[in-house]
Amino acid sequence: MKKKLVGFSFFLAAMAAVSVGAAEMVVDMQHVTHEGTETKIGAIKVEQTAYGTLFTPNLSGLTPGLHGFHVHAAGNCGPMEKDGQMVAGLAAGGHFDPEKTNAHKGPYGDGHLGDLPALFVDASGMAVLPVLAPRLKPEDLSGHSLMIHEGGDNYADAPKALGGGGARVACGVVGK
């Protein structure tokens, strides 16, 4: 019994050590349309761990399935005009790519730093499963935005550019 308690105590200490003490931040997320931002759909908690940055969503009102999830270059979720039409969330710019790799290789590759693991949305429209971005630090996010795309993400630029995630459906600006 004593060995089990010691083992359990070690497990709890190890779990506490995963967080490296950096302050967490919360990013409010809103639906985006070609007219602007709409209703709040929840928030994403961002925190540093020993293994990278952990994104813990608490979101509702999304379509079930996998959704592309990225850090975008600008801290602006507004629409912009492209080819004569207003596009939802386009003011956020492209994926955060400070090294100018111009490559979409996923969260574990050496492409865009803004490539995050895809978000899973359950059958009721909720996203609550955390994802880990091993190459990012929370301070990298300041002044940028978090973007959720309509479809999944294959972490490649083929057959469609930027993982084929599709339209921008939700966005949140990370505070400075």
Image (spheres, helix red, strand yellow):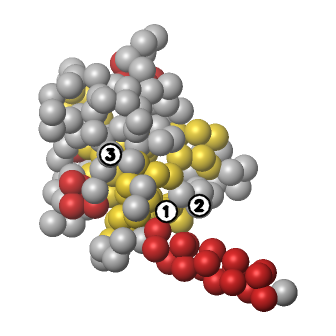
Residue 59 x/y as whole percent: 53, 61
Decide: few, some or many residues near mark 2? Use Cα within 10 Å; few <14, some 14-19, many ≥20.
some
Tag 2 near tag 1, CB within 8 Å:
yes
The residue lying at 21 percent from left, 66 percent from top is 175
Earlier residue among tags 2 and 3: 2
Point out the residue furthest to the right here. Answer: 1
| One can see residue 89 in this view | no
Mark on residue 128? 2
The residue identified by callout 3 is 135
* Above or below 172: residue 45: below
- The quadrant of the rendering that contains the C terminus is bottom left
Earlier residue among tags 3 and 1: 1
Image quadrant of residue 108?
A: top left
Residue 52 x/y as whole percent: 38, 55
Q: Secondary structure at mark 1?
A: strand
Mark on residue 147? none
Mark on residue 56? 1
* Above or below 88: residue 171: below
Image quadrant of residue 33?
A: top left
The residue lying at 58 percent from left, 39 percent from top is 66
Which amino acid does the dot numbered 1 rest on? Thr
Q: Please tell me which residue lies in front, 87 or 47.
A: 47
Residue 128 x/y as whole percent: 59, 60
